[in-house]
Image (cartoon, helix red, strand yellow):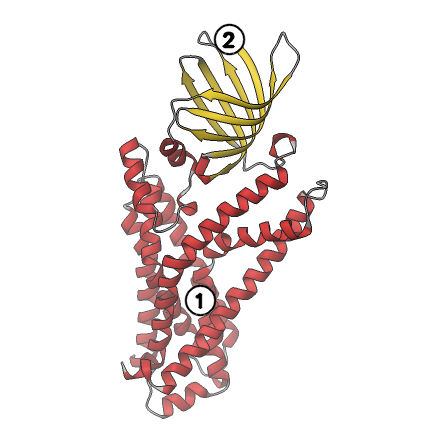
Amino acid sequence: MSMLTNTLGRYFAGRFMVAALGVFASIFLLLVLVDYIEMVRRTSGLASASALMVAETSLFRVPQLLEKLTPFCVLIGAMTCYLALSRKLELVVARAAGVSAWQFISPTLACAIALGVFATTVYNPLSSNLRELSKRMEAELFGGVSGGGLHDASGFWINQVTDEGQAIINAALSEQQGVRLTGLTVFRFDPDSRFRERIEAREAALENGRWLFKGVRRFTLDNPPVEQETFVLPTSLTPAQVQNSFSTPETVSFWQLPDYIRSSESSGFATAGYRLQYHKLIAQPFLLAAMVMLAASVSLRFFRFGGVQKMVLSGVGSGFLLYVLSKVTEDLSKAELMNPIAAAWLPVCVGGLTGFLVLLHQEDG
């Protein structure tokens, strides 16, 4: 415990935090730049798209993308920190003073766990909210373009059947987990499955018992197109049902996941993805600690012994294999072939035990 609070422990912890946050900031800037260039290309034909609005849209999209790379930021940051300490012989001095590897790793582990708690409880809800804000800004950018101007895969589809017949709704962009839609095309059929009309709309919002469309243009077989400011389409869908259908586990914040799990269960929807995401966020602090253990196991070799390149490659390879394992367990869990708790915690256990055993062999073997 004294190592966590004394001057040397604080120094090691500070070096790790600087390295990890530096890697995080570097990847963040790179992703923002790439996404901004792509957004500029997509909005090049829109006169209403200002450079500032495009930049803000890209800036708000990136945090959720970067959240998936947080374990690798910690891994690279810890490797950078320990390699720098080894190159400057600071680890040699610490060992000569009687400080073992377990002692100067413990402050880094504490910082990694603290980072994981912050990422789960603060960064995850923030990134989810920013992602929703970026979707709203995209809707403003592309709202005047036919079809919404952008598509997520093949768009979003809803099929509803009421007393008035069937309606098939396609939307280019979804906000608030499907409660607000942008760039819509609706195909309506009567109760006898005969085509009635096609509707194009700029946006739509789900209210109690109805869809409220805005910026509407209606097409029928016998009459010319009719433009309307608003149009109401009755529906039996509720906001909870649409949200459970449209939302993905990654777009729901940590604090909202328990409610979504209960809501999905009561509505009869599958909850494996939500449960997996919830337990992954709970396990995230320990996953970051496991990444530190992996980094330490390949980064504490003295520079004068050589083999630094092999150490770096082995650390990157270990992180990649752990990522593959996490994707395999995630797919098994979503297919309901593996318990979500086991799927979330298996990569943590494998990574942590691997690093621990390698360090145990190096230090005490």
In the structure shown, which secondary structural element does the residue marked by tag 1 occupy? helix
Decide if residue 119 is on the left or right side of residue 59: left
**Residue type marked 1:** Val
Q: Residue at x 35, y 43 (%)?
A: 273
In the foreground, 23 or 6: 6
In the foreground, 60 or 216: 216
| Residue 311 higher or lower than 125, as above or below | below
In the structure shown, which secondary structural element does the residue marked by tag 2 occupy? loop
> Looking at the image, is mark 2 or mark 1 earlier in the sequence?
1
**Residue 194, disc:** 2
Q: Residue at x 35, y 39 (%)?
A: 335
Q: Nearer the viewer, mark 2 or mark 1?
A: 2
In the foreground, 75 or 122: 122
Q: Residue at x 53, y 43 (%)?
A: 135
In the foreground, 208 or 23: 208
Read off the residue under disc 1: 74
CA neighbours of label 1 inside 10 A, class few (<14), some (14 to 19), many (20+): many
Is residue 4 in sight in this rendering? yes
| Residue 268 higher or lower than 289, as above or below | above
Looking at the picture, how far across and down is residue 77, in whole percent?
A: 47, 70
**Residue type marked 2:** Arg
CA neighbours of label 2 inside 10 A, class few (<14), some (14 to 19), many (20+): few
Looking at the picture, how far across and down is residue 150, in whole percent?
A: 60, 37
